[in-house]
Image (cartoon, rainbow, N blue to C red):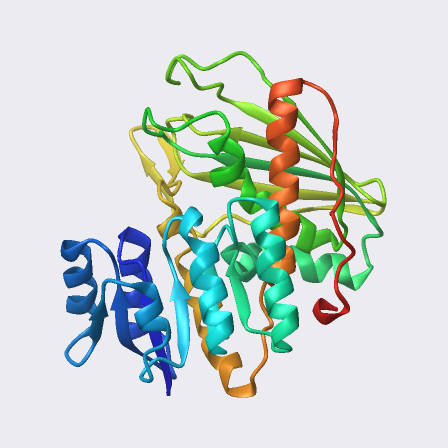
C-alpha cells in the first residue's frame, strides 16, 4: 500500500484526496499539509482518521509514514517542495505547472537527474483521456499518414475578473501545449498569437478570445482557439489532419434530447466533469507504477518544454511577432 502525503488542501487538493481515498487502489492518504487551518482540517476530514496534518511541507515530506508526495499547491510553491522531496528520495506527483519559470524547471530537472532516480510525474491529465488516447493510437498506426495540421479549441463558459491575458497561456492553453506535443511526438520551435475582436463578455483588461499558433520541428502547424468567456460550455476539441485522413476527437457521450421542436446534446461546463475519468486514470497509473518503481506519465522534462513554450506564447502576445522556442540545454539522456 502506497502511503501518500498530499501538500495543498485547496479545491483541487481536496478533489485528489477524495480520489485517492475513494477511487484509487493500492494507496492510502497518511498525511496532508496546508498553511490554512480551515483547509487543513477539511483535508483531514476527507482522508479519515489516522491522517496526520502538517502546516509545513518539509515536515510532511520527511514524515516516515509518507512514501510518496502529492503536490497540489499554487505553482510558485512547487520548486521548494519538489527539491525537498527529491532530497528525501520520495516519489512525486506534481500538478501542473512543474514550476512557474523555465529556470526553476531546469533546477528541478538537474536535481532529479543527479539523484539517479525517476521520481517526478507531472499532472497533465489529458494524456489519459479516452478521446486523446484514441487519436494517439490512430496516428501511431500509420494508416493515415504523417500529421500535417492540428486544430484545437479550448472554450470555457466564464472566467473571473482576476483572469488575465497571460493566464490564457499559463492556465488554459498549457494543456494543449503538452497534449499536442505528446500526440505528434514532436517539439515546438515557434509561437505566435493573434487577437480577434474582443468579446463583450471579457473584463476590460482581458483580450479574449485568442488564437495561438505553434509550429513543430517537422513543420506541423497547430492552431489553438482559446476562448474563456464563450458562455455556452466547457468545449474541448482536437482534430489532426494527416496525409491520408483527418482524425477528430470524439466528444463525451450524452443523449440527444428532443423537446420543444428541438434536438439538443449537453455540453460539459466544468473541467472536473469533462476529465473526471482522465484524472482517475492518471492517479491510478501513478500509484500502480510505484510498485514497479517507474514513471510512465509526463516527466519533469515535459514540464520544462511546456514552460518554455508558454513563455514564448506570452512573449508573442506582447510582441505580435513569431517567437522562437528553444531549450536552454539538450534533453538529458536520463529522460529518454
Is any part of residue 179 visible from this angle?
A: no
Towards the viewer: 42 or 267: 42
Q: Quadrant of residue 263?
A: top left
Towards the viewer: 7 or 168: 7
Please report the residue visible at 48 percent of the width from the left and 21 percent of the height from the top.
208
Is any part of residue 236 visible from this angle?
A: yes
Up-down relation of residue 107 to residue 69 (above or below): above
Please report the residue visible at 44 percent of the width from the left and 29 percent of the height from the top.
228
State the image coordinates of residue 118 (x, y, percent, origin top left): 60, 74
Q: Quadrant of residue 80?
A: bottom left
- Horizontal side, residue 238 vs residue 42: left or right: right
- Horizontal side, residue 52 vs residue 187: left or right: left
Q: How many marks?
A: 0
State the image coordinates of residue 51 (x, y, percent, origin top left): 20, 76
Please report the residue visible at 59 percent of the width from the left and 17 percent of the height from the top.
195
Please report the residue visible at 23 percent of the width from the left and 55 percent of the height from the top.
35
Question: Which image quarter holds the C terminus?
Answer: bottom right
Towards the viewer: 323 or 272: 323
Up-down relation of residue 319 to residue 288 (above or below): above
Question: Which image quarter holds the N terminus?
Answer: bottom left
State the image coordinates of residue 96 (x, y, percent, origin top left): 48, 52
Up-down relation of residue 207 to residue 237 (above or below): above
Q: Quadrant of residue 49?
A: bottom left
State the image coordinates of residue 291 (x, y, percent, origin top left): 50, 87
Amino acid at each position: 500500500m502506497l502511503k501518500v502525503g498530499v501538500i495543498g488542501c485547496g479545491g483541487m487538493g481536496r478533489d485528489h484526496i477524495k480520489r485517492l481515498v475513494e477511487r484509487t487502489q493500492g494507496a492510502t492518504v497518511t498525511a496532508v499539509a496546508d498553511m490554512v487551518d480551515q483547509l487543513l482540517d477539511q483535508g483531514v476530514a476527507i482522508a479519515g482518521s489516522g491522517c496526520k496534518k502538517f502546516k509545513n511541507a518539509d515536515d510532511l515530506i520527511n514524515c516516515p509514514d509518507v512514501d510518496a508526495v502529492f503536490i497540489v499547491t499554487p505553482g510558485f510553491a512547487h520548486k521548494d517542495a519538489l527539491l525537498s522531496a527529491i532530497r528525501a528520495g520520495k516519489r512525486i506527483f506534481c500538478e501542473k505547472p512543474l514550476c512557474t519559470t523555465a529556470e526553476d524547471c531546469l533546477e528541478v530537472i538537474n536535481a532529479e537527474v543527479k539523484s539517479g532516480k525517476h521520481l517526478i510525474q507531472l499532472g497533465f491529465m489529458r494524456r489519459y483521456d479516452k478521446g486523446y488516447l484514441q487519436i494517439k493510437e490512430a496516428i501511431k498506426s500509420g494508416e493515415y499518414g504523417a500529421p500535417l495540421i492540428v486544430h484545437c479549441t479550448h472554450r470555457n463558459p466564464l472566467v473571473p475578473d482576476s483572469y488575465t491575458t497571460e493566464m490564457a497561456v499559463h492556465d488554459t492553453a498549457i494543456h494543449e501545449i503538452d497534449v499536442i506535443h505528446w500526440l505528434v511526438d514532436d517539439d515546438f520551435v515557434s509561437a505566435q498569437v493573434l487577437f480577434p475582436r474582443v468579446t463583450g463578455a471579457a473584463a476590460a483588461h482581458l483580450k479574449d478570445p485568442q488564437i495561438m499558433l505553434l509550429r513543430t520541428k517537422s513543420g506541423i502547424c497547430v492552431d489553438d482557439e482559446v476562448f474563456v468567456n464563450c458562455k455556452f460550455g466547457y468545449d474541448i476539441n482536437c482534430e489532426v489532419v494527416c496525409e491520408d485522413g483527418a482524425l477528430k476527437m470524439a466528444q463525451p457521450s450524452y443523449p440527444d434530447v428532443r423537446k420543444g421542436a428541438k434536438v439538443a446534446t449537453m455540453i460539459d461546463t466544468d473541467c472536473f466533469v469533462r476529465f473526471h475519468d482522465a484524472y482517475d486514470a492518471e492517479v491510478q497509473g501513478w500509484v500502480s507504477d510505484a510498485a514497479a518503481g517507474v514513471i510512465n506519465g509526463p516527466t519533469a522534462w515535459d514540464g520544462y518544454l511546456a514552460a518554455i513554450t508558454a513563455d514564448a506564447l506570452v512573449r508573442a502576445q506582447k510582441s505580435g511577432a513569431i517567437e522562437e522556442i528553444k531549450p536552454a540545454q539538450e534533453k538529458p539522456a536520463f529522460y529518454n
